[in-house]
């Protein structure tokens, strides 16, 4: 096809894409990503504050000395992320609640991540991601 046909074809495609609310989708994806990161950072900060002054794990240990994932951290991350995403989506239920969800969603995400992780860390035996010698022999 000649260059003019390609210019017209691409212009029509771009115009049709401009009719879609792409920016809205990008903003929603970034808000969800913000919730995921907020929960993760809240769990990391909570872990640092809880273990401050206690016997710390050495940062130079190889990966095989650690479990695949930390159960307490994973559970807290999922619960906090779901809390934040539900808060962000309140506007779908009632448009008047969109601002409430956008304002309080990240805050509740951080608070719930810290509370759940702190509670699980104190009540479970998995206080570390290190694989102990006893667990490795089983």
Image: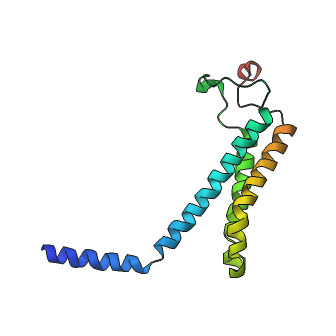
- Number of residue marks: 0
Residue at 66% of width from left, 47% of height from top? Answer: 40
Q: Residue furthest left?
A: 2
Residue at 22% of width from left, 79% of height from top? Answer: 8
Residue at 27% of width from left, 77% of height from top? Answer: 11
Q: Is residue 129 left or right of residue 50?
A: left
Q: Position of residue 124 (x, y in %)?
A: 84, 37
Locate the C terminus and report the quarter of the image it occupies.
top right
- Nearer to us in this view, 83 or 54: 54
Quadrant of res 16:
bottom left
Q: Residue furthest right?
A: 123
Q: Is residue 56 above or below residue 8?
A: above
Q: Position of residue 110 (x, y in %)?
A: 73, 53
- Nearer to us in this view, 112 or 107: 107
Q: How is the image coloured?
A: rainbow
Q: Is residue 133 above or below residue 76?
A: above
Quadrant of res 67:
top right
- Nearer to us in this view, 12 or 98: 98
Quadrant of res 4:
bottom left
User: Would you say residue 23 is visible in this rendering?
Assistant: yes
Q: Is residue 47 above or below residue 116?
A: above
- Nearer to us in this view, 100 or 69: 100
């Amino acid at each position: 096809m000649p260059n003019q046909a390609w210019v017209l074809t691409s212009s029509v495609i771009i115009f049709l894409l401009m009719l879609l609310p792409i920016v809205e989708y990008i903003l929603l994806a970034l808000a969800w990503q913000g919730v995921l990161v907020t929960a993760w950072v809240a769990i990391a900060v909570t872990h640092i504050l809880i273990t401050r002054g206690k016997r710390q794990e050495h940062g130079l240990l190889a990966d095989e000395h650690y479990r695949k994932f930390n159960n307490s951290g994973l559970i807290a991350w999922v619960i906090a992320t779901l809390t934040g995403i539900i808060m962000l989506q309140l506007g779908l239920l009632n448009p008047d609640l969109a601002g409430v969800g956008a304002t309080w969603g990240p805050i509740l995400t951080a608070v719930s991540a810290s509370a759940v992780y702190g509670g699980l860390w104190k009540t479970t035996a998995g206080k570390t991601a290190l694989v102990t010698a006893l667990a490795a022999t089983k």
